[in-house]
Image (cartoon, rainbow, N blue to C red):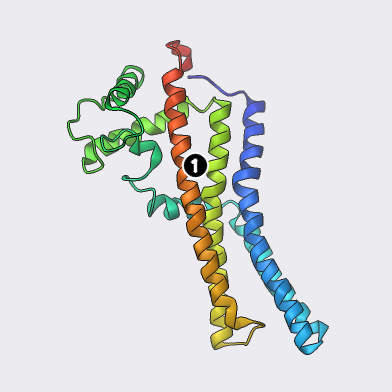
Amino acid sequence: MRQIDKDTQEKRDRRYNDWARKKPALIFMAIPVLIGVAMGIYDFMDTEMWGQAFVCLFSISSISAALFFLLRFSFRDISKYYPGKILFCDRLKPTTRILYSTDDTYSEEQKAAIRKKILAKKSIDLQKYKNKTYQNKKYVKRVDEAVAWLLDVTRFDDILFEYNCIFGFWRNLTGALLVDALLIFGLVAVNKWWYTLPFGSILIWIGIAVILLSVITTLIAYSNGCIFAKKVYDVFMNLDDDKNNY
């Protein structure tokens, strides 16, 4: 199997952290900060009291800043459940779905060639199963093993890494927006039961808008996941037969 040198791995780690972790976290933080600024401005125009306006801005901004550091490395874990577990299930997970007979990304002849090469290089025989769908739990288990290995042996490819960064960004942004929505609905609850917030009556609509935005980013993430998955198999099938490549 091709190895990635230490310098390349470190550069990749920095780029992935920047694209797929830091950027979604910054977007996550921007939404509550903007809400805090808007509340502060609204409160000042209504009361002309700087202190009360500053409290709105400072409190919400402080909460979002604290969550930024807490959640920056947690968005991937959040995304394992949504869209990971909920949407990217065995039926839809792009990297595994390609090997099911119900998927039409590749023809049956191409999928047979992929399975044959996996058998030759990793001794995972996927072709022997007659029912090659997510309903066959034995086949699903073997496909998961094969895909984990495929992701490992194709890791060296720079273009594939770029696609992974893009996919990671949209996937983690989905998780970030969901956390934003929870924070906004938390403010809705505060406005309703504890303390009247500036323009609190429209916070629920802002929360719904963020939820709808997360639906859009989910679709984009899924689309990019499909592109990334196909690239994984394209890279794998274009590897030469030199044993040092595996």
Q: Which residue is located at x 56 percent, y 32 percent?
A: 161
Above or below, 148 relative to 243: below
* Camera-side residue of 210 and 54: 210
Is disc 1 placed on a helix, strand or loop?
Answer: helix
Observer able to see residue 62: no
Which percent across, then down, holds residue 149? 40, 29
Q: How many marks?
A: 1
* Camera-side residue of 216 and 65: 216
Which percent across, then down, holds residue 134? 26, 42
Q: Specify few, some or many for label 1: CA neighbours under 10 Å numbering under 14, 14-19, or 20 or more.
A: many
Q: Quadrant of the C terminus?
A: top left
Question: Could you say which quadrant of the image residue 128 lies in?
Answer: top left
Disc 1: which residue: 224
Residue 57 is left or right of residue 172, and the answer is right
Above or below, 46 relative to 11: below
Question: Three-letter amino acid code at disc 1?
Answer: Asn
Residue 43 is left or right of residue 123, and the answer is right
Which percent across, then down, holds residue 72? 61, 53
Observer able to see residue 237: yes
Which percent across, then down, holds residue 138? 22, 37
Q: Which residue is located at x 73 percent, y 72 percent?
A: 37
Quick one: which residue is furthest to the left in this view? 130
Question: Could you say which quadrant of the image residue 104 lies in?
Answer: top left
Quick one: which residue is furthest to the top in this view? 242
Q: Which residue is located at x 58 percent, y 51 percent?
A: 73
Question: Could you say which quadrant of the image residue 229 lies in?
Answer: top left
Residue 190 is left or right of residue 64, and the answer is left
